[in-house]
Amino acid sequence: MTGDGPTEGPSNSLWGGRFEGGMDPRMVPLNLSLDVDHRLWPEDIRGSKAWAAALGGAGVLTEEEVASIRSGLDAVAARLADGFDFRGAPDEDIHSLVERLLGEEIESLAGKLHTGRSRNDQVATDLRLWGMDACRALIARLTEVLGALLRLADRGRNVVMPGYTHLQQGQPILGAHWALSPFWPLLRDVEALERVIESAGVLPLGSGALAGCPFPVDREALAAELGFHAVTENSLDAISDRDWVLDLLYAGMRIGLHLSRIAEDLVLFGSREFGFVRLSDGFSTGSSLMPQKRNPDLAELTRGKSGRLTGNLVTLATILKGLPTGYNRDLQEDKPPVFDTVDTLRTLLPAVAGAIEGAEFVPERIRAALDPQLLATDLADYLVKRGVPFRESHEVIGTLVRISEVERIPLHELPAERYREVHPAFEADVLEVFDWERSVASRKSRGGTAPNSVEAQMERARKVLAAVQGGATERDASLG
Ligand code: ARG
């Protein structure tokens, strides 16, 4: 490798030595990845500075050489940070570009940096560094959604609404209980991202192209300098392992699925037919034709993006399937899906947080939608409390529901005597069952919808959010 800088057309200076002719022009655009991987430049610089120091420690470079390379890399970073035109660069990928620019700073000494290193362990390291920071940024954004859900729950503490199964009214619940139901899945997503950070935090650098490094670099020190908690055990595995990327894409997909459920509720509950929840103007959209429209595009886009997030996981899994051992260029295709998942979520999460922040319950519409049949289970429980086996009481209430429907008299307007005719265990107080607040208050199990249980749930949610936020602020600070 000569490292003699840019030539006419794409520069093959990283590997051109054995080739006589240039690259076929039809191969050039296929071979380029700079348009995608240029954003790894800060990580490439970080990794390269650490590698220079490791080579110094191994006695491959003198102290002065290490110092010149490191300050040369700083100068390259300053150029790249300052509106560098990546599109105009002739280089194959970000690693080639950084090395060429380093040559412009420190001339032939730049050619010593790549000693013992391959782009295979280099790109694996860069992407892990990028991925760990990306997960931290996503966690910070997820906590904003969690906070918004908690505040929505607070606004729904006194709202009794229908709870649904099969999108049919099932049992009454508190609005706060509904609002907190996505809090926990999204919290599990935060935990999933924390596990991704853990699995990404194993250093591949020092694995070379596939077989390891012949110079005595201290990989543990390298890991510590770069913020990895461990080093890889097998160089062949290290340069091709993208499991942590799969984990990240899976976490991204799951976040998308969880957000799409919130979104679907917002679409339904924001419709004229339900009217339970109103999004703020800032998160509603109009129609270019129909002046009355108030569309939930926010929620629909959220639902749509979940398809894209799912696609990104499938893309990478498909790329990885059937690869032979070792580095294969297919692996370069890992970046578009992972960048897209992270970018998509970085755009989506603040919008979702803002929409939830501004969402309001519409209590009168919710009240109007409550059907007394929502208390059918409570009626069954009434009999159970009087010693009737649940299966029998289920049957009895079914009969009463049928009578109510056939005679077109709502359950709560059937006289107590009609109840007694169907089962002798009913007493005059049966109609007291028809009390929304009482029904909700009866479900006091931990995790249930009774006001006290929901208060306790909110309290736990607040505590875990504070803990996550504590971690997230630390992380944000470390992001610089
Ligand atoms: N651009 C490549 C990638 O992202 C870098 C590694 C290239 N290695 C190689 N042996 N061609 O995977």
Image: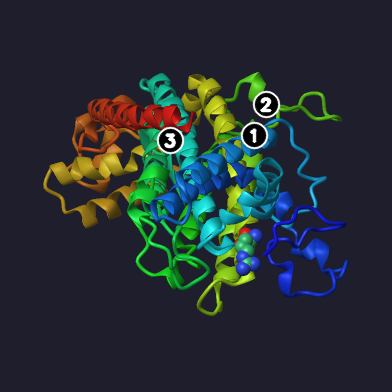
Give the SS element for disc 1: helix
Find residue 162 and name its label: 3
Dot in front, 2 or 3? 2
Which is more N-terminal, label 2 or label 1? 2
Which is more N-terminal, label 1 or label 3? 3
> Residues under labels 2 and 3: Cα distance?
24 Å
Q: Residue at x 56, y 44 (%)?
A: 69
The residue carrying mark 2 is: 284
Q: Is residue 344 left or right of residue 386?
A: right
Count neighbours of disc 3 (C-alpha within 10 A) and say few if under 14, some if 14 to 19, many if 20 or more.
many
Question: Of 279 and 134, which appears nearest the observer?
Answer: 134
Percent x, y of residue 281: 66, 20
The residue carrying mark 1 is: 298
Kind of residue sitting beneath label 3: Pro
Q: Is residue 405 visible?
A: yes
Q: Quadrant of residue 13?
A: bottom right
